[in-house]
Amino acid sequence: MTLKLCSSSTGTTTTGVPADRRRRVPPMAALACAVLTVVAVGTAVPAVAAPAARPAAAADRSGGRLPDLDPQALQRALSSAPDRVTGVLARVSGPDGHWTGTYGTADVATGTPVPVDGRFRLGSVTKTFIATVVLQLAAEDRVDLDQPVQRYLPDVLPDSYPPIPVRTLLNFTSSLPELTPDDLPTTPVAIVEHRFDDHPLAELVAKAVRHERPFTEPGSMQVYGATGYFVAAMVVENLTGHTYQQEITTRILWPLHLRDTAAPETDTTIPGPHSHGYIAVPQQNGGTRLVDITEQNPGAGGMISTTADLDRFLTALFRGRLLPLTEQAELFDVPDVPYLGGTDHDPGHGRAYYGAGLMRATLPNGVTVWGKTGSTFGYTDGMFTTRDLRRRVVYSFNPTNGGGNDLALVNRILSATFAS
């Protein structure tokens, strides 16, 4: 699998945004950013590529001994994309090894090093938090995963739609359509100009459902997208009477003492140490200029965390601290259906590879990992672990192409962590 890489010219400069634009605004734009990242990059495929279909008899080595950690290989992986990222941060944890590393700069204007404890925007990694909240509501008998979403959100989806079970929202088999480049700004100039705009969930869903559904029968195919999670977040809000950010905070962040993690509703800034996010804006002379887009409208894609906090969240999730056994099993229940447009070179080899908010990928050495990738403008991140938690990795980097999951860089990080 290849990815068309975007790079900026040498000698770039930075520019800020006038203070009057740095205003507090209602949430949701970053959730739209997560979608637009997919649109702008031109693919909805997550950043984990399988090299070739492994033999059916190949063992899942996630419970066995992993290769010894190679700090040099990890550092080489972090520094392998200097032409398209400004900073990289990674943390490896677990009984089979610990390592932290950085590359690049947190601020291209000052040359400040990337902070090891830096905070970053999560983008679609927030989907795992939303899925967890929905599954908690299912455990409380407040939502039935087998019932259609229309039961909980009447008048949100078109009357012509078939019943769409709530479970299909979480495992990407809902058949709901996605936003297109015509729905929201996607060019670098437009992204900079509109990154503070508000796009409520209801508006995003209304725009998405104007398009044709990708397949007819809910549950019959899988394809990655964001609309299902827009709707899932709306279900949370309708059932609880609180914003989904509030539910994430009270149900997950506070109980796990994730003090460096936030689900902001209006704050456009990133508090505490962090690397800046940038986007390369084309110039009339044919070059590009890096524009600082660290400040942007929050929302689901605007959740903020650190590598340490995400590692704690992932560990708690896999150990059952957040969900009873029945609901926890939904995380790992990958539907036995085709992946729309899938090939032998993707993580599912043409078949589904997502459970509820988590994806499954098997590396060349047979080690199977579970986790999630995310991206919003200026930030890309991910968290992956073996099922037994023996080795875990959380990473974040700052792409200059507006976002998107850099397949080459992510695969190098995962290979250096689990397969070196």
Image: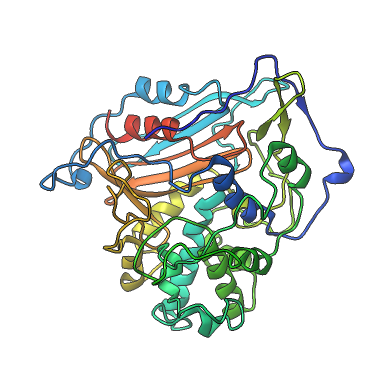
Q: Residue at x 64, y 54 (%)?
A: 32
Quadrant housing residue 321: bottom left
Residue 262, above or below 53 = below
Residue 325: image location, x then y, percent: 31, 70
Quarter in which the N terminus is drawn: top left
Q: Taking 207 as reference, is 159 left or right?
A: left
Q: Quick one: 309 or 395, which is closer to the camera?
A: 395
Residue 109 pos. (x, y %): 73, 22
| Viewer-closest of 38 and 343 | 343
Instruction: Give the residue at the far right of this rendering.
Output: 20
* Quarter occupied by the C terminus: top left
> Which residue is pictured at 51% across the width and 47% down the height?
374
In the image, what residue occupies the spot 43% across and 46% down?
45
In this view, 8 is above or below 44: above
User: Is residue 278 toward the left or the right of residue 45 in the image?
Assistant: right
Taking 253 as reference, is 370 left or right?
A: left
